[in-house]
């Protein structure tokens, strides 16, 4: 190399964005590839990695080709003219060493910027590992490892403090079974169910996931975290799952369990559908057909009262009345569902004020009084019994307005991520990708403007 080659082009160096080296010249090959020649400018590159003593005697020169990000939308080939130095410390076990910089450590063929770009493309860009690898010219294992390194820097090791968490399960894929050679029985190795723990009110996404669908999985995850974090959790939003309720009472005895309103209404809709099918079969000895009154209004029964037009409401009550006794009983089931919704609509989420105890008691009394007037309908009796069993959680929802909507939204994102990846074979990779996907929005909002 002559003297002209050692002159650093500051503008090209800034454009390259590889700290610790300086651009000395740029060549363009016949195929359009730009070759960037660089040399070391970081003084710390001459420090022995074993003892830290700065070397003064050069042994030989070396040429390496580390890969880096494209520049100006075009790929570049880096040629790093570096030196191998002799360590001047006589007691150092390291005789010689080659220059290295933080961006390109020893024995690394990829720059940290390129690895970070690969991890960011998957974690924040919504790309699959294969897509990111094709775009950057990297292999699947390299991109996956880059994702792990990037995720370790952006994801919190411990969940952020919050007053309310949501717990829900989601299923993706099939369970994995393996036959025990000693007993000959098939044993469950990997469950298809994942239980997710999310921030119910802060919008910070998924705190973590565990395999399984039992109380032990929930209890183990909660007890694993520090006591200070658990003490700050005042509310836990769940669906009507007795397994989760039992686990929360063991792991977080001080927390208030909140029954998710969506699942309460869903339960009422299910019992109404069971009542409709049973009475329709009892009247016609078959399923409903076109031309039957119940067939005409079957979809209106699933609608909310406030969403029905006056004409639709008249059609609903009129057609069910024409059915006679069975139609009136179905109408009673629909009114029971609406009375339960009236109770849930007292929540501070809708009224923006703290509901009065008298209003809550009155709405609950109207619901139970209506059920008592139709105690001969087993579907309504079962609904009332479930409401009674979960009344503490339902009352907590009415008072606080906290729901488990964050869990449902995260489950949708998790399933979308799995579909984009065409499924996951490794459950650990699946949980990592799920956390990255569900925390994208909160991490972007946390960035300075």
Image (cartoon, rainbow, N blue to C red):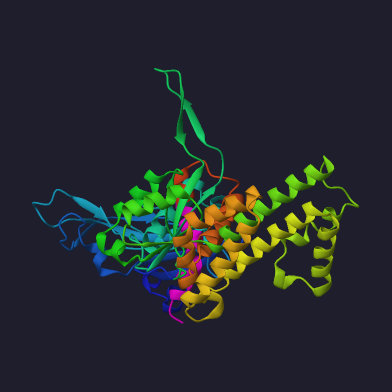
Nearest to the observer: residue 113 or residue 83: 113
Q: Residue furthest left?
A: 91
Please give the name of the residue rendered at 64% of the width and 58% of the height, measured from the top-left corner: 373
Q: Main secondary structure of the magenta part?
A: helix
**381 sits left or right of 208 in the view:** right
Whether the magenta-drawn stretch holds residue 441 is answered as yes
Residue 57 location (% of width, % of height): 19, 60
Please give the name of the residue rendered at 53% of the width and 53% of the height, measured from the top-left corner: 386
**3 sits left or right of 284 in the view:** left
Please give the name of the residue rendered at 81% of the width and 58% of the height, measured from the top-left corner: 320
Image position of 392 with respect to 386: above or below: below
- Determine if residue 441 is in view: yes
Whether the magenta-drawn stretch holds residue 320 is answered as no
Nearest to the observer: residue 425 or residue 196: 196
Residue 87 location (% of width, % of height): 17, 56
**373 sits left or right of 141 in the view:** right
Give the position of the N terminus as an image quadrant.
bottom left
Magenta segment boundaries in residue numbering: 432-449
- Determine if residue 137 is in view: no
What is the quadrant of residue 304 in the picture?
Answer: bottom right
Residue 420 location (% of width, % of height): 61, 52
Image position of 393 with respect to 360: above or below: above
């Amino acid at each position: 190399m002559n003297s002209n080659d050692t002159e650093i082009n500051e503008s090209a160096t800034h454009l390259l964005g590889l700290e610790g080296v300086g651009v000395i010249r740029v060549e363009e090959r016949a195929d359009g590839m730009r070759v960037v020649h660089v040399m070391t400018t970081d003084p710390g590159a001459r420090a022995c990695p074993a003892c830290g003593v700065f070397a003064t005697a050069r042994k030989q020169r070396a040429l390496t080709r580390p890969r880096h990000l494209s520049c100006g939308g075009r790929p570049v080939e880096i040629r790093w003219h570096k030196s191998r130095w002799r360590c001047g410390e006589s007691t150092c076990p390291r005789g010689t060493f080659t220059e290295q910089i933080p961006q390109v450590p020893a024995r690394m063929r990829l720059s940290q910027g390129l690895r970070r770009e690969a991890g960011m493309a998957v974690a924040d860009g919504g790309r699959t590992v294969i897509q990111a690898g094709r775009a950057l010219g990297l292999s699947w294992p390299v991109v996956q490892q880059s994702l792990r390194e990037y995720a370790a820097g952006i994801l919190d090791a411990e969940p952020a403090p919050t007053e309310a968490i949501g717990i829900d399960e989601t299923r993706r894929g099939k369970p994995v079974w393996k036959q025990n050679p000693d007993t000959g029985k098939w044993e469950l190795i990997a469950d298809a169910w994942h239980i997710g723990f999310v921030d119910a009110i802060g919008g910070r996404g998924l705190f973590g996931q565990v395999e399984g669908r039992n109380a032990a999985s929930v209890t183990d995850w909660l007890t694993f975290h520090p006591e200070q974090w658990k003490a700050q959790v005042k509310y836990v939003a769940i669906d009507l799952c007795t397994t989760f309720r039992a686990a929360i009472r063991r792991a977080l005895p001080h927390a208030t369990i909140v029954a998710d309103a969506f699942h309460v209404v869903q339960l009422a809709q299910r019992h109404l559908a069971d009542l409709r099918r049973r009475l329709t079969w009892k009247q016609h000895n078959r399923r409903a057909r076109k031309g039957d009154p119940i067939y005409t209004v079957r979809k209106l029964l699933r609608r909310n009262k406030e969403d029905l037009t006056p004409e639709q409401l008249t059609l609903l009550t009129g057609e069910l009345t024409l059915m006679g006794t069975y139609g009136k009983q179905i109408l009673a089931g629909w009114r029971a569902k609406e009375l339960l919704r009236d109770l849930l609509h007292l929540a501070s989420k809708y009224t923006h004020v703290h509901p009065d105890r008298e209003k809550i008691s009155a709405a609950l009394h109207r619901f139970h009084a209506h059920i008592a007037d139709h105690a001969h309908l087993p579907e309504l009796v079962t609904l009332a019994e479930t409401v009674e069993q979960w009344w503490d959680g339902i009352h907590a929802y009415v008072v606080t307005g906290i729901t488990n909507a964050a869990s449902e939204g995260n489950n949708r994102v998790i399933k979308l991520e799995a579909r984009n990846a065409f499924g996951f074979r490794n459950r650990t990779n699946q949980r990592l990708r799920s956390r990255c996907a569900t925390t994208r929005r909160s991490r972007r909002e946390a960035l300075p403007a």
